[in-house]
Image (spheres, rainbow, N blue to C red):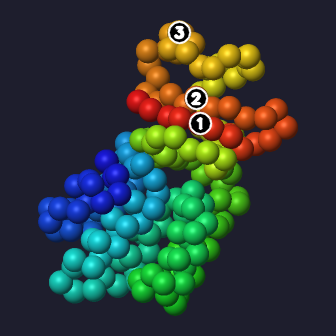
Amino acid sequence: AIEGGTSATTQRSFTALPHARLLELLADARLTATKEEAVHDAIVRWAQAQSESPTDEALLPLFAAVRYPLVSREFFEKLSTQEPLLQGALGAKVFSTAFLAGIFEGRVSRRLGFVPFSGILLNSFKVSDLANWTAHHVRGYDHETRASDLDSIPSSATWVLVGARYKTQDVLKLCAVGK
């Protein structure tokens, strides 16, 4: 699992992984990540910890495993202008590969374990961002959400999002999510 700075990716055993093993882990469909930014950051930590700087040829398949179309715009703008490892030809190759995958290979799916946020948000979460979530109850009603409203959620559900929006808007005015 990759969960930002709180995971095994910050430990010495992670940065000591051989390149081939890291590439194998990144390619594994069972890899869980709370967000793609954490996958990118883990690769940067690994690269910076190597006694000899990895070549562009070694880094390209690692960075190619990051699903860049899913990172936030702010993160992408920052790393495309400030990430030393992705300046020059390597960055151009990584970003063009990500762009082409997003355009020609259809929708880029989220990894297992992705959670857009935890807690409560106001006016900042788009309904369209829930494309990979299973909708259980999406009809309007005229009362606040009660515990009994959640009783019918299947026991197989891992995360529950409760939100409110105006019919004509894509942004949830208020939403909360939890396990």
Position in image of residue 129 (x %, y %): 64, 44
Q: Nearer the viewer, residue 10 or 141?
A: 141
Spatial CA distance of label 1 from label 3 is: 18 Å
Q: Secondary structure at mark 1?
A: strand
- In the picture as drawn, the residue positioned furthest to the right comes out as 168
Q: Badge 1: how crowded within 10 Å, few (<14), some, or many (20+)?
A: some
Relative to 104, does residue 94 appear above or below in the rendering? below
Q: Quadrant of residue 131?
A: top right
Quick check: marks 1 and 3 in contact, CB under 8 Å? Answer: no
Which mark is drawn over residue 175?
A: 1
Label 1 amino acid? Cys
Q: Who's the residue at 41% across and 30% down the image?
A: 179
Relative to 56, does residue 9 appear above or below in the rendering? above
Q: Quadrant of residue 170?
A: top right
Q: Nearer the viewer, residue 75 or 113?
A: 75
Spatial CA distance of label 1 from label 2 is: 5 Å
Task: Name which of mark 1 and mark 2 comes first in the sequence.
Answer: 2
Position in image of residue 28 (x %, y %): 37, 49
Q: Nearer the viewer, residue 65 or 178?
A: 178
Which mark is drawn over residue 148?
A: 3
Label 3 amino acid? Ser
Q: Who's the residue at 53% across and 69% down the image?
A: 75
Task: Name which of mark 1 and mark 3 comes first in the sequence.
Answer: 3
Spatial CA distance of label 2 from label 3 is: 13 Å
Which residue position holds label 2? 162
Q: Who's the residue at 45% across and 81% down the image?
A: 83
